[in-house]
Amino acid sequence: MSTETPADILAESKPASAASSTASSIKAFIAGGFGGVAAVLVGHPFDLTKTRLQTAAPGTYTGAVDVVKKTLARDGLKGMYRGMVPPLLGVTPIFAVSFWAYDLGKNLVYASTPSRTSRVLSTAEVTAAGFFSAIPTTLVTAPVERAKVVLQVQGQGTSPGGRHYNGVMDVVRGLYKEGGIRSIFRGTFATLARDGPGSAAYFAAYEVAKKALVPKGQEAGDLNLGAIIVAGGTAGVAMWSIAIPPDVIKSRIQSAPQGTYTGFVDCTRKTVAADGIGALWKGFGPAMARAFPANAATFVGVEFSRKALDSLF
C-alpha cells in the first residue's frame, strides 16, 4: 500500500501526458476530500472542545472534560458535532488545494535548483514547500473556519452580535450583511500565521516519519496500515505543537463581535493583558488529543481512496 500523498505522486512521477495528468489531479482531489472528511468525522468533537475553551470567558469551564460534560448535558451527543457542516463542505477544496500547493512548492524548489542531481528533497526543502502550501489554501480555509467558529461558540451562548444562526448558510448571510466579504474572511492573516508554520511542520514530519518507518530494502509504497497511522498521527502532533497560540488568536478574532479587535497584534495584546500568557495555550489538550487520530484518519482516508481510484482509472 502506498503512503505517498497525491502531491508526492504528482511531483515524483515521470513526465505524463495531459490526459494522465488530468486523471491524477482528479484522483488527488477526490482522495484529498476523503481524507478531509475522515479527519472531520474523527476530530470535530475535539475541535469543538478546543474552540470553546479558547473563546469562553474565564471561569466558564474548568477544563476540556468540563466542556464535554456541559455540552452533552445541554445539547446531547449532537452538540459535540455543532458547526461540523462548514468544515465538511470545505474539506474537499481545502485538502485539494493544499496538496496541489504543496506540489507546486516542491516544483518551485526544483526550479530554483536546476543543477540538482536528485529529485529527493531535503527536510529543509520539504519544510519550505509545506509552508508555501498554506498560502493559497488559506483563501479557502479562512472563511470555512470563520463560519465553523461562529456556529461552535453560539452553543455556549456567545454568538457574535448576540444573533443565533440556524445553519451555515444563515451564518454566511449574516456575516455578509454585517460587514460584507471582509467579515466572511475575518481572521485570514491569523489563519495563515497558524497554517504556514503548521503546514511546514506537518509535511516535514510526515516525510521524516515515513522514511523512518520504511524497513531496509523496501520502498515507501510498502508501508502498511499501522505505519500510515503512525506517520499521519505524528504529522498532526508536529503541526499542532506549534499552531496553538495563533489558533487561539484566530478563534478569538473570528468569534468576537465586530470592532472588538483591530487585528492580529491587537487581539494578542488584549488576550495576554486580560488572561495572561497562558491564554495563548488554551485548548492545547483537546488539540493534541485530536491531532493524532484526526490526522491518522486523514492519511488512511487518502491512501485507501487513492488505491481504489487507481484501480478504477
Image (spheres, rainbow, N blue to C red):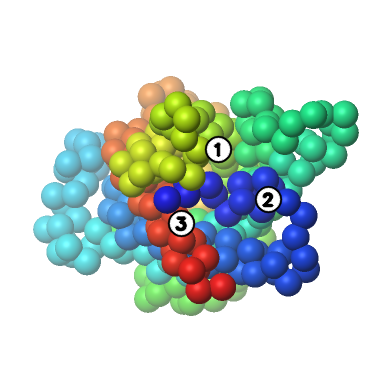
Relative side of 45 to 296, left or right = left
Kindly identify the amino acid type of the residue bearing the numbered disc 3: Val
**Residue sitting at 45 percent across and 26 percent down?**
216
User: Would you say the residues marked 3 and 1 are in contact, meaning their CB atoms lie under 8 Å apart?
Assistant: no
Judge by depth and name the residue closer to the eye, 282 or 235. 235
Taking the spot 62% from the left edge, 26% from the top edge, the residue there is 123
Figure quadrant of residue 269:
top right
Q: Position of residue 175 (x, y in %)?
A: 55, 68
- 10 Å neighbourhood of mark 3: few (<14), some, or many (≥20)? many
Of residue 54 and residue 121, the one placed in the foreground of this image is 121
Q: Nearer the viewer, mark 3 or mark 1?
A: 3
* Amino acid type of the residue that numbered disc 2 sits on in the rendered structure: Ser
Callout 2: 10 Å neighbours few (<14), some, many (20+)?
few
For the image shown, how many numbered marks are present on the structure?
3
Q: Is residue 280 visible?
A: no
Up/down of 225 relative to 211, above or below: below
Local SS, label 1: helix
Q: Residue at horizontal 87%, vertical 33%? A: 114
Please state which amino acid type lies under the numbered disc 1: Phe
Q: Which residue is mark 2?
A: 13
Which tag, 3 or 2, sits closer to the chain's start? 2
- Front residue of this view, candidates 216 and 275: 216
Q: Based on the displayed image, in which of its 4 quarters is residue 22 positioned?
A: bottom right
Q: Position of residue 19 (x, y in %)?
A: 73, 72
Indicate the position of residue 311 as horizontal and vertical percent values.
48, 69
| Residue wearing tag 1 | 203
In the rendered structure, which disc, 3 or 1, sits on the residue that comes first in sequence? Answer: 1
Examine the rendered structure and indicate whether residue 215 appears above or below residue 31: above
- For the C terminus, the image quarter is bottom right
User: In x, y percent, where is residue 38?
Assistant: 37, 59
Q: Which residue is mark 3?
A: 302
The residues tagged by marks 3 and 1 sit, at their Cα atoms, a distance apart of: 14 Å
